[in-house]
Image: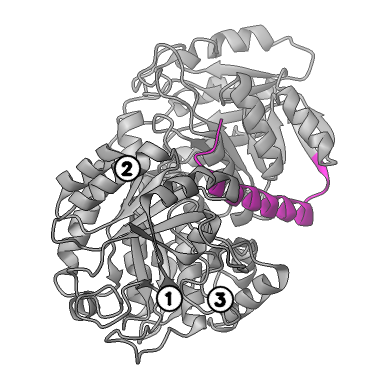
Amino acid sequence: MIRISAGSAVCLGLKANKMDAYPTTAYFLSGNSCRMGCSFCPQSMGNNGALNRLGRVNWPEFSWEQVKEGLSRAEKNGIRRICLQSVRHEEGIDPALELIEKFKDISNLPLSLSAWIKDQQEAAALFKAGADRISVAIDAINPEGYQRFKGGSQEERLGLLFDCARNLPGKMSTHLICGLGESENEALGLVDRLLKAGVTVALFAFVPLKGTLLEGGTSPPVDSYRRVQAGLYLLRKKLAEFNCFKFNEQGRLISFGLPETDLQRFLATGAAFQTSGCPGCNRPYYNERPGGIIYNYHRALSASEREAALTTLIKSLQKSSNLS
Amino acid sequence: MLHKNSDDAHELERILEQAWYTRQANFDASIVFNSPGNTVSVSVTGSSCALNCAHCAGVYLRAMVPLEKALDNYKNWEEGTSFLISGGSDALGKVPLVEHLDRLRELAELGPLNLHTGLVTEEEAKKLAGIAAVVSFDLVGDNETIAEVYGLSATVEDYLASYRALQKYARVIPHLCIGLKGGKIKGEYEALHLLRKEKVEAISMIIFRPTAETPYSDCPPPPPAEVANFMASARLMFPYTPIFLGCMRPGGHYREVIDTYAIRAGVNKIVLPSPAARKEAARLGLSIKTSEECCSL
């Protein structure tokens, strides 16, 4: 048995719900309860969250036979990648290794793995088994937040991620969650370091989830999230440089160091506000309820959505008339 | 020329569209196709070069006309001629033009000179400006690339200082070689960021082409999609600056793909365009102007 995100299950033909958005990656969740104690996550051993949940999403269980059948029609249904999210198991990476091999037997889709690895050798073994990309989730952006919400040393995790990225260029990803007490300066500073090291960054907004220690928390203000999204995009596309970004004393971004007309032109496609991360990943409604503010658009933005996102962003910045 | 995946392709399509809108908004609907039959390539060092860089190793000097021969050949030439002046470099990354200043001045009487200087001091820039119709200056945005390709200990700062010195006295067209570091895109975007803070009349882009008998002979040219993204980004970052696709770029099918991308990315001139470029220009409603000179002149 393996858990599949509800949306993915529909795309694999295993459930018949009608949805307003379809994933372009099939998301799988391996394991029940995680050895990590992340206070934002229902899978954490320290939380009483529902174990059929990760993020906002419900993950019903299916048999391997059903998965096999489902994956045979995945591509036809718009699925371009498999994402295997593994909790931190007692048995280390063995369950993930086994699953990757099983997936590779039945599907040619590229597979991303998000798992807790202890060293580069483990990463190498997982790639050898058939993983296309591996994510070492940093989640909490500043070291204090990491210590507080995940436990342990962020520096050590980052060190491993950078080492892997150096030796396996273009193969490593990470996930960052905005809204865990970090400043925008810290967020974009880390994004810049990660991108320069060749790590793909997937950005999320914190969502308070029932049964977790942080269930009483709040999602980050959307204007703040837009600034970090835009910063990530500008840095990723090399349209701007981090050392030109300006922040106020609280670490809030006040300027990208670009005239407004440039910013409009660079961000006009709206791509900055779409889900980031591995190719093919769109994670519909992972950060937000359908019908509300969309933090990560799972599809191209409409003209009015682009306009709204850009207006939110630009209005929140310092007037740029004195910048050139 | 497949994309790694459809997302990259989708993202590229959108940035190309945005670049195209930018071009349409700021330039007229024409493009210049150069076939520089009237420009003679001249080397002031014959076929010798102290650097023998990884991408060239002096190979391209062999096809150039030595300075003395050019003076001799073209002194009674009646048709219009222009000269691309280059040569091997000395061990410090300078093309020894000042040493040949008098002879070059004579050549300048016969037709406009497009000087490829390499690194210069302000003093040299001033002297060379007197004979240059235009200066073509290779700007590199990454120290590692300078060290690996040219074998120089010079830095990006040195290149920028030379650019500024030349810019002060002469018309300068910065040249960016996409994929210079053995086909990899390394400091190219950084060079664009540097240029955004400088006065820039136009930008000429060339693309690394693997050349036999050079250390980089086995390196593939940069992936076309990455080059396209770079050209489109340059258009977005320089909405009002003419951008040229210069003669130095790979041929064959690669050239067809790149030329098509270049037009969609909003370039204003293409030297020796492939037939595909002609087609794409027509498809996008650009009228074609022609020039017999090299792109910087």
Residue A251 is situated, as x and y percent measured from the top left of the image, at 36, 82
The quarter in which the N terminus of chain A is drawn is bottom left
Q: Identify the coloring.
A: one colour
- Quick check: marks 1 and 3 in contact, CB under 8 Å? no
Residue, disc 1 = A56
- In what element is the residue under mark 2? helix
Residue A7 or residue B56, whichever sits in front: A7
Distance Cα–Cα, label 2 vs label 1:
27 Å
Which numbered mark, 1 or 3, is in the foreground of this view? 1
Residue A223 vs A132, above or below: the answer is: below
Residue B288 or residue B276, whichever sits in front: B276
> In terms of sequence position, does the residue under pointer 1 or pointer 3 come before the other?
1
Magenta stretch, overall SS: helix
Distance Cα–Cα, label 1 vs label 3:
13 Å
> In terms of sequence position, does the residue under pointer 2 or pointer 1 come before the other?
1
Q: Quadrant of residue B131?
A: top right
What amino acid is labelled 1 in the image? Answer: Arg
Q: Residue at x 36, y 25 (%)?
A: B90
- Which numbered circle lies on residue A102? 2
| Pointer 2 local density, CA inside 10 Å: few below 14, some 14–19, many at least 20 | some
Residue, disc 3 = A294
Residue A319 or residue B294, whichever sits in front: A319
